[in-house]
Amino acid sequence: MPTTMNAASALDEPTVESALSITGQVRQPLSLSLDDLREYESIVAAPFDLRCFTTKRFIRNVGGYRGARLTDLIEKAGLLNESPTDFKRMVFIAAAHDGYAVTFSWHELFNTPIGENVLVAYECDGRPLAVEEGAPILFSGSDRHSAPRHVKRLARIVARLLAP
Ligand SMILES: Nc1nc2c(c(=O)[nH]1)N[C@H]1C(S)=C(S)[C@@H](COP(=O)(O)O)O[C@H]1N2
Ligand SMILES: [Mo]
């Protein structure tokens, strides 16, 4: 089962057992191992061409990922909103162990179809993904250029309220 953790330890470098943390403006910070991700409903993405945004180059074809929906993980942690409209200016930073980071907005994830296709993958074509292959991999299946939000070795999701 997913374990809970306090906000201070959530900021520490994730260990192998706690591959991914969900922190920031949440009710219950989470620390999830690759096995914990399997406790959530899984979705399978269609195979796709990995394409870099900067160079526009085709990198390689990638098989069908299986993973948990990012929105399900965020809902489990629960958003902490002091005012009922706070979530409208909330963003999520998804950062990898190497410091690579991308963003999602609350609207994108919860108020457009893009969110339905954002997964944290632990399997590819029915085979478990190894940490050496980048597990867990965050992947946004609706993006035009697939590589930017194809984040290998996802380490944390941080929920942040932007100042108006
Ligand atoms: N963790 C992590 N994921 C990442 C990146 C990175 O630097 N670190 N670069 C992104 C970009 S810009 C590209 S083009 C692809 C490159 O994929 P590859 O390294 O598997 O060829 O990974 C994406 N995911
Ligand atoms: Mo890229």
Image (tube, rainbow, N blue to C red):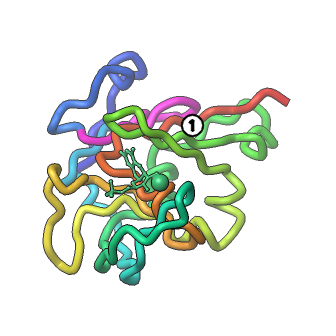
Badge 1 crowding class, 10 Å Cα cut-off, few under 14, some 14 to 19, many 20 or more, is many
- State the image coordinates of residue 16 (x, y, percent, origin top left): 15, 37
Instruction: Give the side of residue 157 with respect to residue 113, left or right.
Output: left
Q: Total of numbered circles in the picture?
A: 1
As drawn, 88 above or below 35: above
Q: Is residue 15 magenta?
A: no
Instruction: Give the side of residue 141 with respect to residue 1, left or right.
Output: right
Q: Is residue 28 magenta?
A: yes
Q: The residue under label 1 is which amino acid type?
A: Ala
As drawn, 138 above or below 91: below
| Quadrant of the rendered image containing residue 123 | bottom left
Kindly identify the residue that appears in the image at 40 percent across and 38 percent down: 156
Instruction: Give the side of residue 104 with respect to residue 60, left or right.
Output: right
- State the image coordinates of residue 157 (x, y, percent, origin top left): 46, 40
| Quadrant of the rendered image containing residue 46 | bottom left
25 or 97: nearer the viewer: 97
- State the image coordinates of residue 12 (x, y, percent, origin top left): 31, 20
- State the image coordinates of residue 161 (x, y, percent, origin top left): 69, 32
Kindly identify the residue that appears in the image at 48 percent across and 67 percent down: 57
Image quarter where the C terminus lies is top right
Q: Which residues are magenta?
A: 19-30
Reading the image, the residue beneath label 1 is 159
